[in-house]
């Protein structure tokens, strides 16, 4: 029975999405038949879109029970993974920087629902969940975090440098704001090749003041590049509140001559609607800015408790009022697309799935010492490289 | 550009103006505004856009009006371009060329005269080339564009105006030079002189003067700063036993320092004299013509250093 539902689910998934590559491996849905229907329903977004020099899309979003359950599942996988990463960091299996995304899942999931894998996404260093949304698997994500051979960058990148080229996910960048011109460049290539695809170029409220953003936006507008600048406004640039860093924190308006929308980033359906609208707009008219009003429960990174610059009440309040997973859960239950118990069981399955992935990732060995010298260049045949003591370690690149 | 439609040029004044130094003259008419892009004066922005386009498989040529302005964009050259292939374990390669005039021109002052060879050659993941002759310019630029890695191509404004004899082979459309190989511009047996870009011409003039005094100098045109052709340099020093390194840029932590160390590591026993270094003066470039002349190596300086390496000079005071 479950297998039959699973087959139906994967079939409708393939039909609904334009992309060919499968997502995070589908969970077996339970025998009762959680509604996998693709009958559409219409839901209103939590708040209307705020707009800057463009007419906003409608607040009425069409969705299906199947899509909502997929949203619930995907966001829950992300939530569980980030919390698991927190534990791994505290047990010192993850080193260096680790920037967690829990709270912001609706942005990644809603965006993915609006586009195809031929569209491109680029972001900064809070990239684990974008990687998962683009089809990255849990094992390679955790292995990369722990610096293992089976990591998505073979252990050479780390938390801030996840990439998935075959899904047009371009990382994974550590320098605040640098990804914005890079994303405009990807869009440039898409237009140059007349691909009919777009780039979603993500950055935070902290990066929104970077000069290179405005330099790139100017050129994007001049050359009508199919790029959507997405400001994931979680209201804190590291420890600095947006109103302390930005004279104008209305990031959707900061494009001046570039249109913008402000979106409730905790409402996955609003995100989906805005991204769909933005993609169509960018293909016709060039750049547009989407400001996602979102929130991160963790601090900036694992070395930030996140409580010196904001109150615990604020964090708890958002969790209570605006949590993206809770919102979708309420919608599913209100429409009786699944029972509370079924959703609980799904969450249990997900927990197990994440734990299994971590266990598998832990089995992956550290990279071989020879990997120190691989991928320095693409064309490196015969070039010399040196270790710390070149009388001990001196090699010719492969 | 004619061979590969994914190659395009972007930079300030490369199109309608026909190039600040006329290097891209005629290209806009030939290839159109989609492939020859005039950018606003926003290096950080357009360099990032170029690198992003390379991420998605195009082959951009990003022109800096001079490499002094590349400092505005250096984060993209190093963090976004040089390191990407490594950090992504080969998923994201960056087939881009950053080119433009490097080093001193004449009378342009401190902010417009710096040589960036040592800065960029420091970074693993980049390739750094410095042509001297017309043959170098043609062969190395084609190699750079065809190379799948990020290449910094350091030209020289004063050399743009110089003419060089070229063979029929060089004029052939398929002519290309390998990256990482130096050229022995002049064979010799008494002392090796390494140089790149404009200094190669000065070294050749110095070699002529030295020849009249019975010193046979071997002049190596490095062509490739990274990767450095250590094999050629060491082979030459093993033959001559003496070395003078010449560069235009600031002396501390410069190209000569690396070459000297390479020779000490690999060919110490062959040295019959300490390695000599000629470099720009350790000061920002002054404007006044006489001071500028003191700040940049002249042919006489190279001759003097070569004689010292051959123990043929009268001892002189170390300070002015």
Image (cartoon, helix red, strand yellow):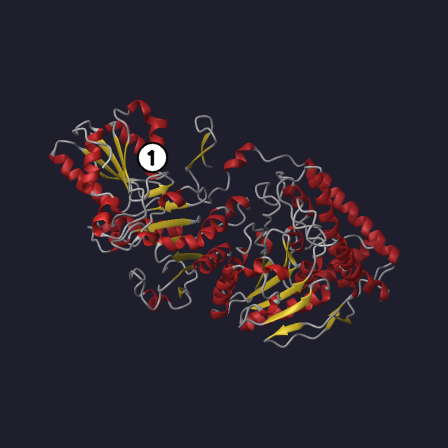
The foreground one among A345 and B257 is B257
Q: Which residue is mark 1?
A: B259
Left or right placement of residue A280 versus residue B271 in this view: right
Residue at the left extreme, as displayed:
B212
Left or right placement of residue B31 versus residue A80 in this view: left
The foreground one among A308 and A298 is A308
Q: Chain of mark 1?
A: B
Work out whether residue B188 can be spotted: no
In the rendered image, which quarter contains the C terminus of chain B? Answer: top left
Residue that appears at 66% across and 53% down: A135
Question: Considering only vertical position in the picture, is B45 above or below B184?
Answer: below
Left or right placement of residue B316 versus residue A268 in this view: left
| Rendered image quadrant of residue B43 | bottom left
| Rendered image quadrant of residue B63 | bottom left
Residue that appears at 35% across and 52% down: B142
Residue that appears at 44% across and 41% down: A380
Residue at the bottom extreme, as displayed:
A55
Query: Quick one: label 1, few (<14), some, or many (20+) residues within 10 Å?
Result: many
In the rendered image, which quarter contains the N terminus of chain B? Answer: bottom left
The foreground one among B306 and B204 is B306
> How far across and down, in percent of the image, does residue B280 sit?
28, 43
> How far across and down, in percent of the image, does residue A94 sit?
66, 40
- Number of numbered discs: 1
The foreground one among B141 and B249 is B249
- Helix, strand or loop status at disc 1: helix
Left or right placement of residue B161 versus residue B213 in this view: right
């Amino acid at each position: 029975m479950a297998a039959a539902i699973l087959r139906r689910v994967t079939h409708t998934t393939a039909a609904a999405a334009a992309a060919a590559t499968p997502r995070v491996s589908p969970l077996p849905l339970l025998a009762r038949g959680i509604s996998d229907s693709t009958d559409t329903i219409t839901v209103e977004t939590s708040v209307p879109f705020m707009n800057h020099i463009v007419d906003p899309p409608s607040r009425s979003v069409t969705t299906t029970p199947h899509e909502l359950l997929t949203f619930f599942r995907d966001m829950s996988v992300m939530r569980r993974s980030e919390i698991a990463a927190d534990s791994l960091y505290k047990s010192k299996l993850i080193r260096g920087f680790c920037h967690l995304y829990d709270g912001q899942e609706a942005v990644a999931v809603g965006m993915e629902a609006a586009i195809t894998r031929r569209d491109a996404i680029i972001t900064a260093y809070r990239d684990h969940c974008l990687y998962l949304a683009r089809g990255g698997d849990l094992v390679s994500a955790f292995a990369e975090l722990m610096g293992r051979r089976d990591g998505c960058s073979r252990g050479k990148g780390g938390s801030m440098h996840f990439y998935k080229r075959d899904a047009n996910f371009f990382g994974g960048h550590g320098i605040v704001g640098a990804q914005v011109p890079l994303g405009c460049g990807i869009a440039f290539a898409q237009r140059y090749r007349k691909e009919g695809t777009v780039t979603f170029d993500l950055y935070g409220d902290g990066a929104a003041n970077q000069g290179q953003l405005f330099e790139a936006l100017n050129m994007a507008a001049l050359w009508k590049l199919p790029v959507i600048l997405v400001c994931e406004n979680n209201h804190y640039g590291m420890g600095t509140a947006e109103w302390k860093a930005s004279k104008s924190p209305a990031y959707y308006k900061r494009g001046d001559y570039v249109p913008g929308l402000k979106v409730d980033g905790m409402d996955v359906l609003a995100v989906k609607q805005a991204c769909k609208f933005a993609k169509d707009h960018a293909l016709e008219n060039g750049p547009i800015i989407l400001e996602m009003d979102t929130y991160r429960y963790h601090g900036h990174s694992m070395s930030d408790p996140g409580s010196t610059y904001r109150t615990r009440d604020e964090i708890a309040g958002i969790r209570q009022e605006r949590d993206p997973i809770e919102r979708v859960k309420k919608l599913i239950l209100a429409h009786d697309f699944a029972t509370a118990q079924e959703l609980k069981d799904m969450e249990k399955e997900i927990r197990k799935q994440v734990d299994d992935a971590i266990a598998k990732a832990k089995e992956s060995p550290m990279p071989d010492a020879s990997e120190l010298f691989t991928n320095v260049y693409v064309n490196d045949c015969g070039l010399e490289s040196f270790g710390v003591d070149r009388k001990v370690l001196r090699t010719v690149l492969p | 550009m004619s061979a590969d439609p994914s190659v395009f040029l972007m930079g300030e004044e490369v199109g309608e103006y026909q190039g600040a130094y006329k290097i891209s003259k005629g290209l806009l008419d030939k290839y159109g505004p989609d492939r020859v892009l005039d950018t606003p004066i926003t290096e950080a922005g357009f360099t990032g856009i170029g690198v992003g386009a390379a991420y998605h498989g195009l082959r951009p040529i990003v022109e800096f009006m001079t490499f002094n302005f590349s400092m505005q964009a250096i984060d993209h050259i190093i963090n976004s371009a040089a390191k990407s292939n490594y950090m992504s374990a080969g998923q994201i390669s960056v087939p881009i060329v950053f080119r433009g005039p490097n080093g001193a021109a004449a009378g342009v002052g401190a902010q417009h005269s710096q040589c960036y060879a040592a800065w960029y050659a420091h970074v693993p993941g980049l390739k750094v080339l410095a042509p001297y002759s017309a043959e170098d310019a043609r062969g190395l630029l084609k190699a750079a564009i065809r190379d799948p890695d990020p290449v910094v191509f350091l030209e020289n404004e004063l050399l743009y105006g110089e003419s060089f004899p070229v063979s029929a082979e060089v004029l052939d459309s398929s002519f290309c030079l390998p990256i990482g190989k130096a050229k022995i511009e002049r064979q010799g047996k008494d002392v090796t002189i390494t140089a790149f870009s404009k200094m190669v011409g000065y070294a050749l003039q110095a070699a002529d003067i030295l020849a009249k005094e019975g010193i046979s100098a071997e002049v190596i045109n490095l062509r490739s700063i990274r990767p450095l052709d250590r094999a050629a340099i060491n082979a030459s020093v093993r033959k001559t036993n003496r070395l003078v390194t010449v560069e235009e840029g600031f002396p501390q932590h410069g190209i000569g320092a690396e070459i000297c160390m390479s020779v000490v590591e690999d060919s110490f026993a062959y040295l019959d004299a300490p390695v000599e270094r000629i470099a720009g003066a350790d000061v920002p470039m002054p404007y006044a013509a006489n001071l500028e002349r003191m700040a940049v190596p002249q042919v006489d300086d190279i001759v003097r250093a070569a004689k010292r390496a051959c123990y043929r000079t009268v001892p002189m005071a170390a300070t002015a």
